[in-house]
Image: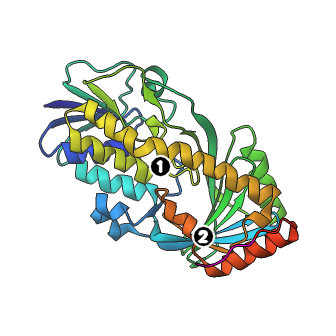
Amino acid sequence: MKVAIVGGGICGLYLAYQLGEKEDVFLFEKKEGIGKKACSSLVSERIFHFLPQSRKIIKHKIRGVRLYFPSREIFVNFKKDFFVFERKDLENLLLSLAQKRAKIYFSKETKEIPEDFQRIIFSDGAFSFSQKFLLKGSKNIYLGMQGFEEKEDYSQITEVFPTKNGFIWKIPRGQDREWGIVEKKEDALKIFDLFLKERKIKIKNKKSSLISQGFLFPKKKQERYAIVGEARGLVKPWSFGGIIWGLTSCEILKKHFPNFLNYEKELRKTFIFQVFFSQFLKKIVYFAGFNFPFLLFLKNYEIDGDFFDFSVFGNLFLNKLNLNKLNKFFSKTNQGFSLKNK
């Protein structure tokens, strides 16, 4: 089957490699090359399921994140380890694999749905042809910025400083540190510059890119084309990372190829809850952290860094020590409540 893939980022290259084994695949990328997108590439160990070869290009390992609200500090442990990569290394690895199975063309911008192909896959990212003309729905627009401090840091803890709508981060990378921010585009630069100035942090090699987050729906049912990755708004609401979610959408497409209607059904089943509930939960955590920090009474939490699961509430309800803290809280409010272990 003759297949066109529009977009040569991680998702597009991955699909070119996977589908190119059996199909006649053509990939079209509007840029002259790859690896230029601003991206922290802090990815969970799930990456090895999709790309086992990526073990060879790991830069550093991360096991958790420390969040600093104005008057509350909490630690979040990841159930699955995370690893730091260079975005360009991941894309170069995928390019070397995809070139063996697919025909890849750079400097080829797509302004309409390609003809002469039996199936077309759009992996063209945010603010792309597919987002503008083929999708509908509400999306949130953010600006991501990053830079690098020339200071060795082998800590395995990422530090996060929540802002109104996003956060500032520090990622240890071994030989250096990455500092960055994701926020509403009109506020990001001002907040980031002030943060760095107050802490006398100097960074180099600044990059930025716009991020589109929020599950988007096709304007009409289509058997001939499908849309994957960030073009669909598949960016985690709490971390704004999109690599694992994007690759998961690619794996779903591969599973159902060439039936794009079944792909769409499973994609919605997999992600709609994840997107909308995670957005809601993030708002609750931020509201508590900035306004009622005592509600975040635990100092340590454990989560799956990619997909929300209800076991996170076990931190609240299954820990006997926490019941004592709740009882103290209720006694202060004079409500007469009491929680007991059973």
Magenta residues (range): 338-342
Tell me: residue 89, above or below residue 125: below
Residue at (32, 40) in percent of width and height = 266
Residue at (64, 42) in percent of width and height = 143
* Main SS category, magenta section: loop
Q: How far across and down, in percent of the image, does residue 328 sit?
A: 80, 75
- Residue farthest to the bottom, as pictured: 321
Amino acid found under the numbered disc labelled 2: Phe
Label 2: state its secondary structure.
Answer: helix
Tell me, for residue 317, which label it has, or none. Answer: 2
Q: Is residue 251 left or right of residue 147?
A: left
The residue indicated by pointer 1 is 242
Dividing the picture into quadrants, the one containing residue 268 is top left
Dividing the picture into quadrants, the one containing residue 264 is top left
Q: How far across and down, in percent of the image, does residue 311 sit?
A: 50, 65
Question: In front: 35, or 73?
Answer: 73
Say whether residue 69 is visible.
no
